[in-house]
Image (tube, rainbow, N blue to C red):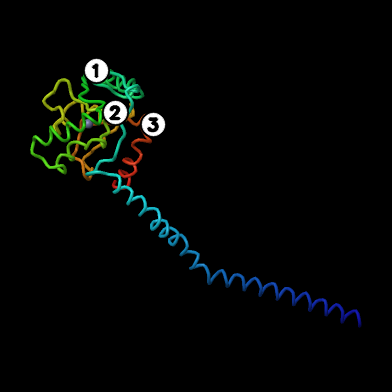
Amino acid sequence: MENDKLAKNINDIQEAQREYLKNNRNFKFKILYFLSPLLLLLPPLFWFQYQKVFASRSSNSKYDEKVLGHFPYFEISKNNLIEIQPNIFVHKDMYSSLLRMKSEAEREGIFLIFLSGFRSIELQEEIFYSLKAARNQIALERAKVSAPPGYSEHSTGFAIDIGDAQNRETDFEVEFENTRAFKWLKRNAAKYHFRLSFDRNHKSVDYEPWHWRYEGSIDSLKIFERANREKNIIN
Ligand SMILES: [Zn+2]
């Protein structure tokens, strides 16, 4: 009898424990259930904060750095330059890639000609302030077709203006895009790590089908990182 009572008590205790645990678990689930909408709010909240802090910082610096739509570029030291055609110098890191591209094109009957490679900031100054001024263009108009001194990809040695040796009348003209040379470049330049700098979608610089830049080394990629990052935002 005493034992029965004890057993019943133990049963009651176990029952009570089970009940307690069940309720307790339910309570935890209930809290989670009510908090879940708040958890869903967290990612957008973080994203919003990120946009507020970082995106505004980068967009401000973007506008601080650029002049008339062009990023600033330093002038490469002369030790890093090699003459690739009479009076046309390019960065030694892109020299062989550029030559390979030219000879590959020639094998397919396309004759590329290099029109302009490295340009010193001094020469860029002459182009921007003398040549373009003589055409009676204000700075904003000039910047659409030529970079201000200190803001040209040409001063890095990693930019090259290319023409079609069989269609010289299209040198530095948008019509260059109709030549076989351009069509070949469009299909093949990426194999040699070249890409168009100013395509039709560029916001502030006019379309320049002849102007290509080299992105086949970490140094060159670092130099063009800002320009590429902006491109990705626009496109
Ligand atoms: Zn150019």
Q: Report whether 172 appears left or right of 50.
A: left
Q: How many marks?
A: 3
Few, some or many C-alpha atoms within 10 Å of disc 2 (few <14, some 14-19, many ≥20)?
Answer: many
Q: Mark 2 or 3 closer to N-term?
A: 2
Residue at x-position 16% and y-position 44%: 140
Give coordinates of residue 115: x percent, y percent: 20, 24
Task: Give the camera-side residue of 118 and 209.
Answer: 118
In the image, is the residue at mark 1 within 8 Å of ligand 1 by its beta carbon?
no
Q: Amino acid at mark 1?
A: Gln
Choose top left, top right, bottom left or bottom right for residue 85: top left
Q: Quadrant of ligand 1?
A: top left
Q: Amino acid at mark 3?
A: Asp
**Label 1 residue SS:** strand
Question: Which residue carries the number 3 mark?
Answer: 219
Q: For the residues marked 2 and 1, what is the alpha-carbon distance in whole angstroms?
A: 19 Å
Give coordinates of residue 154: x percent, y percent: 26, 30
Q: Mark 2 or 1 closer to N-term?
A: 1
